[in-house]
Amino acid sequence: MEDYILIDKTVFFPENGILAIGDLHVGYEHMLKQSGMNVPHTQTKDIINNFKGIFLKLKEKNYKIKKIVFLGDIKHFFGYEKKEKLALKEVYDFLRQSFSEQDIIFIKGNHDKFGYFGKKLKNYYVRNGIIFLHGNLKYEKVYEKPIKTVVMAHLHPSIILSDKKGVKKEKFKCFLIGNYEKKRFIVLPSFLEITDGIAVNDYREDYSKYSSIIPKEALMKFNVFVIGKDEIYEFGKLEKI
């Protein structure tokens, strides 16, 4: 029996009461608008509604969330953007209705350059043999013996599925789960709804550009878990899709 639950685009560890969330990228919608794209201004509302749905599903299963860990790239702009900051505050204020400040943990991603709301960004967070981090930088802590599970984001994994003739193709967000360096790795999809992510079975660019702590050869051995409308489906090894 697994000690974690994949729910929507997040992973929950019942024994520890920890909900991990990958790549929020608050402000991405604003970036698209600045570039001239006409997109609806719904990202913040969508994030909060998504949280509400996840919280409700866990509550219905009688699970209690004790801590929320954001796995980096919480905001999108590399610099300071007022609208982005206001959107992030709206999300944070919503979470503060149910969680104390110390139970909302921010991990530093490559898009995060400073702390939020007086909270210092962490390089990683460790709890009972599980380490939570962004996944772009290597830390010696990851490879210490007590660490059994590594939970990361950064890769924005999705998968392209097509019919037998290759005519109809669709992209779906997915989790990647497998073993590397004698550790179990769980790679989360981005929480961002506006984009589907990066198709891990269709890398057309050099994988090394993503600076992941998991090499491509190892990642291809991971199992793919595709996020459907109401369920998550296991698709087997990435290298066989």
Image (tube, rainbow, N blue to C red):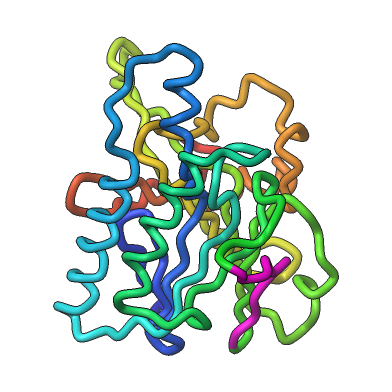
* Residue 152 figure quarter: bottom right
Tell me: residue 234, above or below residue 101.
above
Left or right: 160, with 142 as reference point: left
Tell me where residue 14 appears, x and y as whole percent: 37, 83
Tell me where residue 203 appears, x and y as whole percent: 61, 26
Q: Residue at x 47, y 67 (%)?
A: 20
Left or right: 47, with 2 as reference point: left
Left or right: 199, with 191 as reference point: right
Magenta: main secondary structure equals: loop
Q: Residue at x 43, y 83 (%)?
A: 100
**Span of residues in magenta:** 118-127
Q: Nearer the viewer, residue 156 or 78?
A: 78
Q: Is residue 209 magenta?
A: no
Answer yes or no: is residue 100 visible: yes
* Residue 51 figure quarter: bottom left
Tell me: residue 224, above or below residue 107.
above
Extreme residue in the front direction: 82
Q: Nearer the viewer, residue 15 or 89?
A: 89
